Amino acid sequence: MTTMKPISPNDHYFDHYLFDNGSVARMIAEQTGGQVVAIDLDTTHLPRTPGVEPHRHDIREGVPAGPFDLIHARLVLTHLPARREIFAQLIDELAPGGWLVLADVGLADELLVAPEESDHDVWRKYNDAAYRQVGPAAGHDNLWAEQTEAAMFDAGLSEVSAEHLVPLARGGGPWAVYQSNLSKQAETPLLAAGLSMTDMERYRAMLIDPEFRARFFSLTYTAGRKPTS
């Protein structure tokens, strides 16, 4: 997440990341000339740059005190069981007229081109273990992203808008590499969920095959503004 220390009434921002290198925080600082405080559980890849102050913080322990003119969180609330409580806290910390911008993922689950016919079965087994067992057991909710727009309306935000994207992943490309890395990070719970090591290895091999094409996730950006009165 990224926060900005206020240097004027309109220069106070908050931004949070689950996986990021501070690119949005730097963009906010550069375009506004304000001071951004960027928070994450691990700030190793979140270097201090002009206008950006990285801080290690767990948002589950509370949202930093505002008010903020902008709060941005990318790939965060989907993964947190207390997402609705944190969502309400984020709105509470907005300044009147401030913007809340959230980006979260949903499950697309479309294997478009498989290098081998049997890969369709491997894909199904892997996704069942990862996104219908391991993820939900950890508190992930792949439906949250599409519920965010309604949640913002229900919370009384105005000028609410949403954009829904479904990236195409190619074998060996960044989305496929990202999924391969996730499979390695979650290998122990995936195997415990019943996925075999043979299927795991075939899944990773599929992801680097140049013929592979799939849609793993949808990405929904939703923004809303807090009323001024």
Image: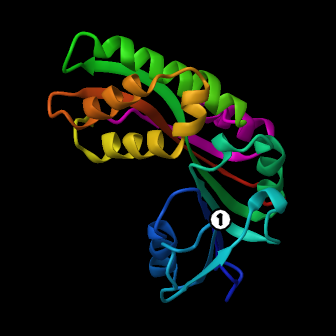
Asked whether 144 falls inside the magenta stretch, the response is yes
Q: Is residue 22 left or right of residue 189?
A: left
On-image quarter of the N terminus? bottom right
Helix, strand or loop at label 1? It is: loop
Local packing at callout 1 (Cα closer than 10 Å; few below 14, some 14-19, many 20+) is some
Give the residues drawn in magenta, as a range: 140-168
Residue 194 appears in view: yes
User: At 45% across and 72% down in the image, what residue appears?
Assistant: 27
The picture quadrant where one finds residue 100 is bottom right
Which colour style is shown? Answer: rainbow
- Near-viewer residue (172 or 156): 172
The residue to which callout 1 is attached is 41
Measuring from the top left, give residue 93's x and y in whole percent: 81, 63
Q: Is residue 144 left or right of residue 24?
A: right
Check the image and report above or below for 122 versus 159. above
- Near-viewer residue (160 or 117): 117
Check the image and report above or below for 83 versus 195. below
- Near-viewer residue (191 or 185): 191
Measuring from the top left, give residue 49's x and y in whole percent: 48, 86
Measuring from the top left, give residue 131's x and y in whole percent: 56, 26
Q: Is residue 79 left or right of residue 94?
A: left
Measuring from the top left, give residue 222's x and y in whole percent: 58, 44
